[in-house]
Image (cartoon, rainbow, N blue to C red):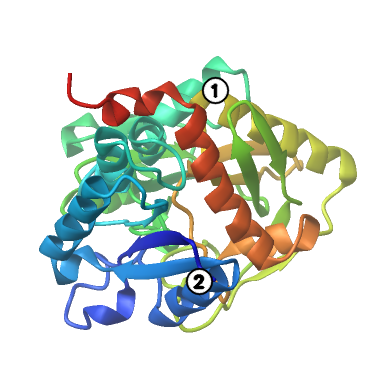
C-alpha cells in the first residue's frame, strides 16, 4: 500500500507544441516523465503530476493541502526548468524551504550559482581546479581583444546547449563580433572562453553535503564539431557515451567533481561536464543541478547505470536524499516553525 506522496512538478516539452522550441529546450518529454512516474510508483509512493504552466492554482491548492494536513508525508520532486530567468531552477526549492516542505535536489542558492557559468568558474578557480580563462560580456562594447583564437561563445545562464552550435567557435575578431552580436540579441550575457578541441566528458555526483559518490566518467561522441542544441533531442539520442577513459584521469575528474559539489553544498544529484585539450588535460566546463533524468536521452542516468546501479536505484536515492536534507538541514527551520 502506498503511504508516501511525491508531488512531481515538471515542465513537459510535448504539452506546449506552439511554444518557442528554445524556451522549452531543457524540458523533459512526456514519455520520459511517465517513465519516471512509473518508477516512483513502483518504489512505493503515490505520485501526483503537476505542470505549473498548465495551471498555477493547482500548484497552490496542492501546497495549501499539504500545509493544512501535517500528517501528509510528501516531497516535491523538482523538475521545473522554466525559461529566460536566472532564478528559474530555484523556484521550487525556494518555495519548499519557505513553506517547510521537503524537495529533491539542491537549494535555490546553489541552483542559481550553477546557472551562472561565469560565477561558477570563479569558484572553480578558487579551488585551483583547471578551467579555461573566460570573459563575461553583457554588451557588444565589452568584447575583449583576445589574441589567443580560437574562442568559444555561449550564453552564460542557459543549459542543454541552448545558444550553442558550430557557430560558437570563432577564429578571428570579425567572427567574434558577428557571433557576439547575434547571441546578445537573444541572451543577456555571453561567456567567451578559450576553445578546447579535445573530447567532451560527463559524469554524475550523487549524495548530500558533505558525502558524495561519483559515477563513471562518460566520453561523449556526436555527429558534429560542437555538442550543440541541434544534437539534443526529446525523441532520440544521436550522441553516444563510452566509458573507456584512462583510470588515473577518471579518478582525478571524479575527485575534483566531488570537491566542487562540496564547495557548492550540493544536495541530491548533479551532472558535471568537462572537456579535454589536445594534450588530454581535463578542464571543468559547468555543473548542472537540475540535470535531465530521462531514461531515454539523458547522460546522468546512463553514467549512473554504468557504475552505481539501476535507474530505479538512482531515483530512490534522489528521493531519500531529499528527505534526509529536509530532516537534518537548518535551511528548513524557518519554514518548519509553527506560529509564535
The residue indicated by pointer 1 is: 263
- Residue situated in front as seen by the camera: 174 or 231: 231
Q: Is residue 130 visible?
A: no
Q: Are marks 2 and 1 in contact (CB under 8 Å)?
A: no
- Residue situated in front as seen by the camera: 158 or 283: 158
Q: Residues within 10 Å of mark 2 (few under 14, many from 20)?
A: many
Could you say which disc has been placed on residue 36 in the image?
2
Residue at image point 78% right, 34% down: 252
- Residue situated in front as seen by the camera: 303 or 77: 77
Give the image location of residue 14, x and y in percent.
31, 81
Q: CA distance from mark 2 to mark 1?
A: 30 Å
The mark closer to the camera, 2 or 1, is 2
Mark 2 vs 1, N-terminal side: 2
Q: Is residue 172 left or right of residue 43?
A: left
Residue at image point 18% right, 66% down: 53
91 is higher (above) or lower (below) than 10? above
127 is higher (above) or lower (below) than 287? above
Residue at image point 72% right, 40% down: 213
Quadrant in which the N terminus is drawn: bottom right
Give the image location of residue 257, x and y in percent.
65, 35
Tell me the SS state at disc 2. helix
Q: Is residue 313 visible?
A: yes
Residue at the far left: name it. Answer: 57
Give the image location of residue 180, x and y in percent.
26, 47
Quadrant in which the C terminus is drawn: top left
Give the image location of residue 120, x and y in percent.
44, 30
Residue at image point 32% right, 32% down: 136
Could you say which disc has been placed on residue 283 in the image?
none
Q: Is residue 278 left or right of residue 16?
A: right
Residue at the far right: name it. Answer: 247
28 is higher (above) or lower (below) than 80? below
Tell me the SS state at disc 1. helix
Amino acid at each position: 500500500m502506498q503511504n508516501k506522496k511525491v508531488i512531481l512538478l515538471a515542465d513537459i516539452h510535448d504539452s506546449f507544441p506552439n511554444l518557442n522550441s528554445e524556451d522549452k529546450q531543457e524540458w523533459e518529454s512526456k514519455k520520459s516523465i511517465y517513465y519516471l512516474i512509473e518508477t516512483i510508483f513502483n518504489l512505493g509512493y503515490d505520485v501526483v503530476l503537476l505542470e505549473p504552466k498548465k495551471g498555477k492554482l493547482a500548484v497552490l491548492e496542492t501546497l495549501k493541502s499539504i500545509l493544512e494536513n501535517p500528517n501528509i508525508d510528501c516531497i516535491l520532486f523538482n523538475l521545473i526548468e522554466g525559461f529566460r530567468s536566472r532564478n528559474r531552477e530555484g523556484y521550487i526549492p525556494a518555495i519548499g524551504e519557505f513553506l517547510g516542505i521537503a524537495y529533491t535536489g539542491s537549494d535555490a542558492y546553489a541552483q542559481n550559482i550553477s546557472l551562472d557559468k561565469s560565477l561558477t568558474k570563479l569558484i572553480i578557480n578558487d579551488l585551483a581546479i583547471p578551467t579555461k580563462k573566460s570573459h563575461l560580456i553583457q554588451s557588444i562594447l565589452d568584447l575583449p581583444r583576445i589574441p589567443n583564437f580560437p574562442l568559444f561563445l555561449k550564453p552564460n545562464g542557459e543549459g542543454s546547449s541552448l545558444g550553442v552550435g558550430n557557430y560558437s567557435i570563432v577564429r578571428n575578431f570579425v567572427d567574434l563580433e558577428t557571433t557576439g552580436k547575434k547571441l546578445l540579441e537573444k541572451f543577456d550575457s555571453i561567456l567567451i572562453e578559450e576553445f578546447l578541441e579535445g573530447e567532451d566528458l560527463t559524469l554524475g555526483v550523487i549524495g548530500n553535503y558533505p558525502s558524495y559518490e561519483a559515477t563513471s566518467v562518460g566520453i561523449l561522441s556526436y555527429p558534429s564539431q560542437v555538442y550543440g542544441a541541434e544534437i539534443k533531442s526529446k525523441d532520440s539520442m544521436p550522441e553516444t557515451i563510452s566509458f573507456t577513459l584512462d583510470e588515473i584521469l577518471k579518478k582525478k575528474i571524479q575527485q575534483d567533481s566531488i570537491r566542487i559539489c562540496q564547495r557548492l553544498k550540493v544536495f541530491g544529484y548533479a551532472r558535471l561536464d568537462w572537456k579535454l585539450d589536445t594534450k588530454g588535460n581535463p578542464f571543468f566546463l559547468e555543473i548542472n543541478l537540475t540535470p535531465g533524468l530521462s531514461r531515454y536521452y539523458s547522460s546522468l542516468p546512463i553514467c549512473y547505470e554504468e557504475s552505481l546501479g539501476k535507474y530505479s536505484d538512482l531515483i530512490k536515492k534522489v528521493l531519500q536524499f531529499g528527505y534526509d536534507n529536509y530532516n537534518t538541514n537548518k535551511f528548513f527551520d524557518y519554514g518548519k516553525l509553527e506560529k509564535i
